């Protein structure tokens, strides 16, 4: 396993050397108000680590309690085989919230460097009509499948109870990967009038280029936010067939947030160009801060 991991790291470094020339056009800075608009969803992504209760009292720590008025509907997972998740209604933004728990960053980085996974097809019973050319990380796919049915049921309940057609999906780390899969899964099972927003933090690559292209075409309101030299968003490597969809926002070392158009933008202002390989990364950046918010309870 040590030899295999070293080989994966070496190939990742070689892949970075072969990157295409930097793209600087169309990269724009976010305003203070645009950055602040993400903060409520950052708190929700953080709260997913805390196994929040769905009783009348919604209380599980400062980050969990930051969005006042939130109405919990359902929660699940065990934090081990199945990541914690919760569904509820956010009256401030008039949206159903779906939040997925992340995982320990040091363990997750090791898992992403381990080649004991493969790109595989999505389950047609969960993803009807999805082309067989679209493939995703088998571990993410299997983890998502364990929570997808109860989450779909909870979302339908929340939409009916609160009279909304808006759904916002959030997550950090592994939770961001699950959120991205939900952003493909849920629209296949909810009314066409439903609108979606997806915000992922420290998201790894989830699928192949066909998957990224599908997301670019069908998931119309999605951002994945990368913090400084976080290694997770550059894994698994592109040489293994993985690709990020568009929607990247990169937090630079000076804490300026910039938009990075395209799939895996290689500008040195964006994640792939800034962090050429894991030796140039800092795992401490994975949990944030994202506009002062650290992930976790």
Image (tube, rainbow, N blue to C red):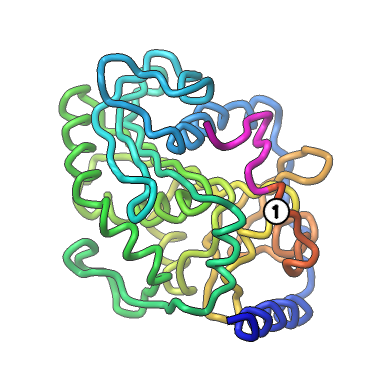
In the displayed structure, 129 sits above or below 181; it is below
Judged left or right of residue 89, residue 163 is left
The 10 Å Cα crowd at callout 1, few under 14, some 14 to 19, many 20 or more, is some
Q: Horizontal and vertical percent for residue 175?
A: 45, 49
Q: Closest to the observer: 149 or 165?
A: 149
Q: Which quadrant of the figure has residue 130? A: bottom left
Give the SS element for disc 1.
helix
Q: Which quadrant of the figure has residue 126? A: bottom left
In the displayed structure, 200 sits above or below 43; it is below
Q: Horizontal and vertical percent for residue 14?
A: 74, 82
**The residue positioned farthest toward the front in the image shown:** 2
Q: Closest to the observer: 21 or 145?
A: 145
In the displayed structure, 140 sits above or below 166; it is below
Q: Look at the image and say whether residue 292 sits in the magenta stretch.
A: yes
Q: Residue at x 80, y 63 (%)?
A: 280
> What secondary structure predominates along the stretch shown in magenta?
loop
Judged left or right of residue 196, residue 246 is right
Counting labels gives: 1
Q: Identify the residue position indicated by label 1 in the image.
A: 283
């Amino acid at each position: 396993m040590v030899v295999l991991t070293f080989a994966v790291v070496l190939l990742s470094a070689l892949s970075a050397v072969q990157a295409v020339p930097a793209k600087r056009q169309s990269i724009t800075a976010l305003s203070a108000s645009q950055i602040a608009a993400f903060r409520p969803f950052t708190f929700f992504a953080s709260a997913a680590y805390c196994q929040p209760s769905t009783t009348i009292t919604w209380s599980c720590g400062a980050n969990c309690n930051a969005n006042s008025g939130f109405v919990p509907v359902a929660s699940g997972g065990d934090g081990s085989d199945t990541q914690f998740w919760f569904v509820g209604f956010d009256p401030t933004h008039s949206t159903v919230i779906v939040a997925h728990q992340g995982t320990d960053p040091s363990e997750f980085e090791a898992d992403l460097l381990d080649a004991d996974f493969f790109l595989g097809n999505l389950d047609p019973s969960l993803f009807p009509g999805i082309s067989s050319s679209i493939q995703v990380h088998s571990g993410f796919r299997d983890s998502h499948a364990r929570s997808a049915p109860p989450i779909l049921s909870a979302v339908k309940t929340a939409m009916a109870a609160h009279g909304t057609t808006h759904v916002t999906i959030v997550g950090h780390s592994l939770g961001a990967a699950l959120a991205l899969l939900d952003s493909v899964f849920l629209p296949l099972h909810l009314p066409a009038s439903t609108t979606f927003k997806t915000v992922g933090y420290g998201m790894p690559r989830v699928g192949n280029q066909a998957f990224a292209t599908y997301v670019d075409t069908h998931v119309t309101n999605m951002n994945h936010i990368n913090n400084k030299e976080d290694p997770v968003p550059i894994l698994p490597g592109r040489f293994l067939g993985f690709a990020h969809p568009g929607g990247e926002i990169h937090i630079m070392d000076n804490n300026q947030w910039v938009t990075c158009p395209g799939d895996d933008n290689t500008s040195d202002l964006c994640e792939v160009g800034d962090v050429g390989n894991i030796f140039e990364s800092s795992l401490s950046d994975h949990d944030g801060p994202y506009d002062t918010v650290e992930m976790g309870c």
